[in-house]
Image (spheres, grey):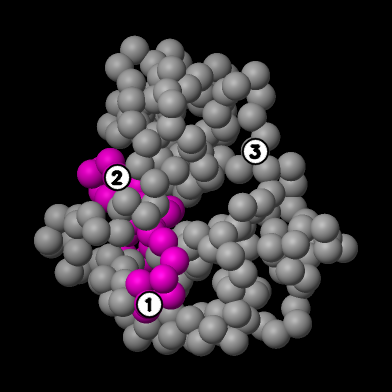
Amino acid sequence: MGRVVSPHDLLQLAPGTPDFPDAPAWVAASLTRAPFVVVRRAVSVNGLIAVGIRGEIRSERFGSWLDPRFVADVLKPESLGPAKPATTRANFLPAFVLLQAIAPLCEATGCTWGPTGSAGFELASGYPTVTQTSDLDLLMRAPEPLDRAAAKTLFDALSQAALDHGTRIDMQIQTHDGAFSLAEYAHPGARVMLRCADGPKLVADPWQTSQAA
């Protein structure tokens, strides 16, 4: 596989992918329903990709490692924004309704963005994973620093949209080095927790990781 993968990317498994070692019983059934795994944030070991597998319920989560040669396709969050679920689900489930509503707000930032979590998984795999109570998880890529005032404006607009649609929203901002919560960054002067491959770092400026506390 020649493509670079990043945390939150969804990987479609190739036919013949071997079973994951020490996997609980539900993993095989889950991958039969939807042969997709999500890239975890971790340092690569022996060229393997850190991946997570999701089951039918929230408690069913399993972390493992995948040989890149078993990746059939890579679906990044930003490629899933234009994807559409079944019409009955798009107009009925709050997370999908909210995804449509906040698209103009995210586009206006000029940054690439897209859904992760259950919404991203359903849009990538076609398997119904979003429920009536699902949050909407988003990833926005910001290789260049974001103005904190603009971040606060975006956070307030997203929060109001989520409130209007009776659900919750969580946006992670991805830099070159890691990711942090928009909610944390929206508070002026506050340090934020930057989640990096080698562990979390409390920083004043997520684009200058040398400022870790």
Using the image, tell me which numbered label, if any, was put on residue 108: 1
The magenta segment is 105-134
Residue at coordinates 35% horizontally, 42% vertically from top-left?
75
Label 2 crowd bin: few (<14), some (14–19), many (20+), radius 10 Å: many
Say which amino acid is labelled 2: Ala
Residue 33 shown in magenta: no
Residue at coordinates 31% horizontally, 77% vertically from top-left?
104
In three-dimensional space, the C-alpha distance between marks 2 and 3, rounded to whole angstroms, equals 22 Å
Residue position for label 2 = 124
Please tell me whether mark 1 or mark 3 is closer to you in this view.
1
Residue at coordinates 63% horizontally, 62% vertically from top-left?
180
Taking 178 as reference, is 102 left or right?
left
Residue 137: name its quadrant. Answer: bottom left
**Is residue 53 visible in the rendered structure shown here?**
no
Residue 11: name its quadrant. Answer: top left
Label 3 crowd bin: few (<14), some (14–19), many (20+), radius 10 Å: some
In three-dimensional space, the C-alpha distance between marks 1 and 2, rounded to whole angstroms, equals 24 Å
Say which amino acid is labelled 1: Ala
Q: Is residue 17 above or below residue 173?
A: above
x then y, percent, for residue 120: 36, 52
Say which amino acid is labelled 3: Ala
Residue found farthest to the front: 144
x then y, percent, for residue 159: 46, 82
Residue 120 shown in magenta: yes
Label 1 crowd bin: few (<14), some (14–19), many (20+), radius 10 Å: few
Secondary element type, mark 2: helix
Taking 28 as reference, is 94 left or right?
left
Residue position for label 3 = 42
Secondary element type, mark 1: loop
Q: Earlier in the sequence, mark 1 or mark 2?
A: 1
x then y, percent, for residue 154: 48, 81
